[in-house]
Image: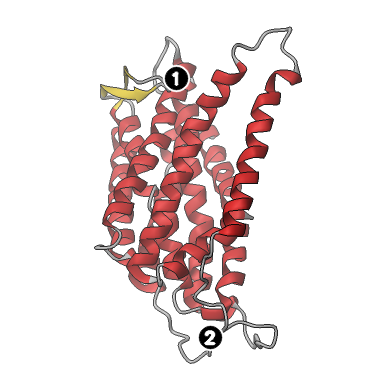
Amino acid sequence: LLNTVVNPMLNLLGGGGKRGNQLNMIGGTFNSLAGTLTPMFVGALIGELTKESDFADVNMVLYIAMAVFAVAFIVLALVPIKDPEMGRVTAATKFEHSPWNFRHFVLGAIGIFIYVGIEVGIPGTLNFYLSDTTENGAGLLANAAAIGGLVAGTYWFLMLIGRIVGGAIASKVSSKVMMIVVSCVGMVLILAAMLLGKQVTMSMPVFTGDGFGMETVPVSAVLLVLCGLCTSVMWSCIFNLATEGLGKYTAAASGIFMMMVVGGGVLPLVQNAIADSSLGYMFSYVVPLLGLAYLLYYALVGCKNVNEDIPV
């Protein structure tokens, strides 16, 4: 619900275009930063879990969570934030159409569905691949599950780095150009990973939560982890492109976008079903590969607003 409100607000405050995308990217950076630090912070507060651990041990965490919501409420209530759409959309405003009447939005909503599936599917299947000690897995015998978790965690850490970099350059690079570049790079990385398989290995730095350590993994795993840099900026870019020119329909469009994150539960299931078949883990990455091909199409062609005749 918070994202449903915050995403269009940041885009509107930035005036859409590059500036709107930059603000969304910066917002995503804080989102990723909190997602990276909060589990470590909560773990430090709770301490080691034992048989004697009780629900009361997490009371401090719950109090902190309530305090965060209280501070957010006070800030939003007291700080004047001018909505550029305020005054144009009133109770008397007529909505003759809906976001579904805009082709570029419909294709963008499909893009978000696919994107979230890609974002979740790449590290999720990679974790299973590295943790699998059978001949179908990556060939890691010692601490396979631990290494798989660390490598997958590094993917999410790279998403944080990507959003920081994306926020810095978003005012100079358009959402369309950024989407084209990251989609192409992501496709190259996945295709290379599929072709290399597990024959070639290398040592890669992995984020452990306390710092970085070195682990020996297939080169294909490294290439898939690097995809985190590509997926990091896609949400903001797709949102920016799909809501451009929607005017009074932007709020409704944002709500639809948040429903489309269900792709993060659907596409990974398809990918894992392929991975569990005789085709294997690496071939399952054809799912995110085709997804990136669609996102490239959207950035090149599908994002164009062909319904400018609809009053907004």
Is residue 141 visible to us here?
yes
Residue found at x 47% / y 75%: 104
Distance from disc 1 to disc 2, alpha carbons, whole Å, reads: 57 Å
Q: Find residue 261 and report its horizontal and vertical position in percent.
A: 58, 53
Of 204 and 189, the residue lying toward us? 204
Q: Amino acid at mark 2?
A: Val
Q: Is residue 245 above or below residue 108?
A: below
Residue 135 numbered tag: 1
Q: Which of the colour schemes (rainbow, by chain, secondary structure, one colour) is used?
A: secondary structure
Is residue 137 visible to us here?
no
Q: Amino acid at mark 1?
A: Glu
Of 98 and 75, the residue lying toward us? 75
Q: Is residue 305 left or right of residue 1?
A: left
Q: Is residue 158 above or below residue 9?
A: above
Residue 30 numbered tag: none
Q: Earlier in the sequence, mark 1 or mark 2?
A: 1
For the N terminus, the image quarter is bottom right
Q: Secondary structure at mark 2?
A: loop
Q: Find residue 311 and report its horizontal and vertical position in percent.
A: 53, 90
Residue found at x 48% / y 71%: 243
Residue 312 numbered tag: 2
Q: Are marks 1 and 2 in contact (CB under 8 Å)?
A: no
Q: Residue furthest front?
A: 78
- Please rate how many residues cluster around mark 2, counting C-alpha atoms within 10 Å: few if below 14, some from 14 to 19, many from 20: some
Quadrant of residue 221 within the rendered picture: top left
The mark closer to the camera, 1 or 2, is: 2
Q: Find residue 105 and report its horizontal and vertical position in percent.
A: 51, 72
Q: Secondary structure at mark 1?
A: loop
Residue found at x 49% / y 69%: 107
Q: Find residue 266 and report its horizontal and vertical position in percent.
A: 60, 48
Q: Is residue 185 above or below residue 280?
A: below
